[in-house]
Image (cartoon, helix red, strand yellow):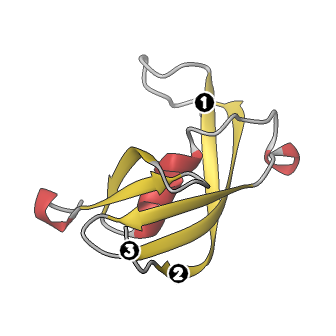
Amino acid sequence: MARDQDKRNFALRDDDGTEDSVFSGGTPRQAALKAARRLDPADSESNADRTTLRLREKGTHKVHIYEGWAWEEDAPDDKPDWMPGVITKGNVEKQGVEHLEEI
């Protein structure tokens, strides 16, 4: 597991450039997976709508662009007691990196 100093913060950018949510992770993909789980989940992975996620690394002008989707599925049989019976899963696919002139 990454130590706190290894974590980086990534702001989720809307189309108009506003940044409402911040996700942390050791890599941009880890933060994108967290953001994808917040999407409206479909009933299966094959039916999930794909959404563009634009994550700007805090302190830089780099924007990591991912395509993300989320779906619900039954929790594993060996789940802990606190976990619900249906869980949301997400996945992402990197589309590229963009550099902003100004933030």
Q: Is residue 13 left or right of residue 10?
A: right
| For marks 2 and 3 on the same chain, the one whose residue lies earlier in the sequence | 2
Tell me residue 71's x, y (percent). 72, 40
Q: Residue furthest right?
A: 47
Of residues 48 and 54, the one drawn nearer to the viewer in this rendering: 54
User: Looking at the picture, which amino acid does disc 2 mark?
Assistant: Val
Of residues 80 and 12, the one drawn nearer to the viewer in this rendering: 12
| Residue displayed at 36% across by 48% down | 22
Work out which quarter of the rendered image holds the C terminus and state it: bottom left
User: Looking at the picture, which amino acid does disc 1 mark?
Assistant: Ile
Of residues 64 and 73, the one drawn nearer to the viewer in this rendering: 64
As measured in the structure, the alpha-carbon distance from the residue carrying label 3 to the one carrying label 1 is 38 Å
Q: Is residue 89 left or right of residue 50?
A: left
| For marks 3 and 1 on the same chain, the one whose residue lies earlier in the sequence | 1
Judging from the image, what secondary structure is the residue with disc 3 in?
loop
Judging from the image, what secondary structure is the residue with disc 1 in?
strand
As measured in the structure, the alpha-carbon distance from the residue carrying label 1 to the one carrying label 2 is 30 Å
Find disc 1 in the rendering and name its residue: 87
User: Looking at the picture, which amino acid does disc 3 mark?
Assistant: Glu
| Residue displayed at 18% across by 67% down | 6
Q: Nearer the viewer, mark 2 or mark 3?
A: 3
Seen in the picture, residue 53 relative to 93 is either above or below; the reply is above
Find disc 3 in the rendering and name its residue: 102
| Neighbour tally class for label 3: few under 14, some 14-19, many 20 plus, Cα within 10 Å | few
| Residue displayed at 50% across by 58% down | 32
Seen in the picture, residue 72 relative to 3 is either above or below; the reply is above
Find disc 2 in the rendering and name its residue: 97
Q: Nearer the viewer, mark 3 or mark 1?
A: 3
Of residues 12 and 43, the one drawn nearer to the viewer in this rendering: 12
Work out which quarter of the rendered image holds the N terminus and state it: bottom left
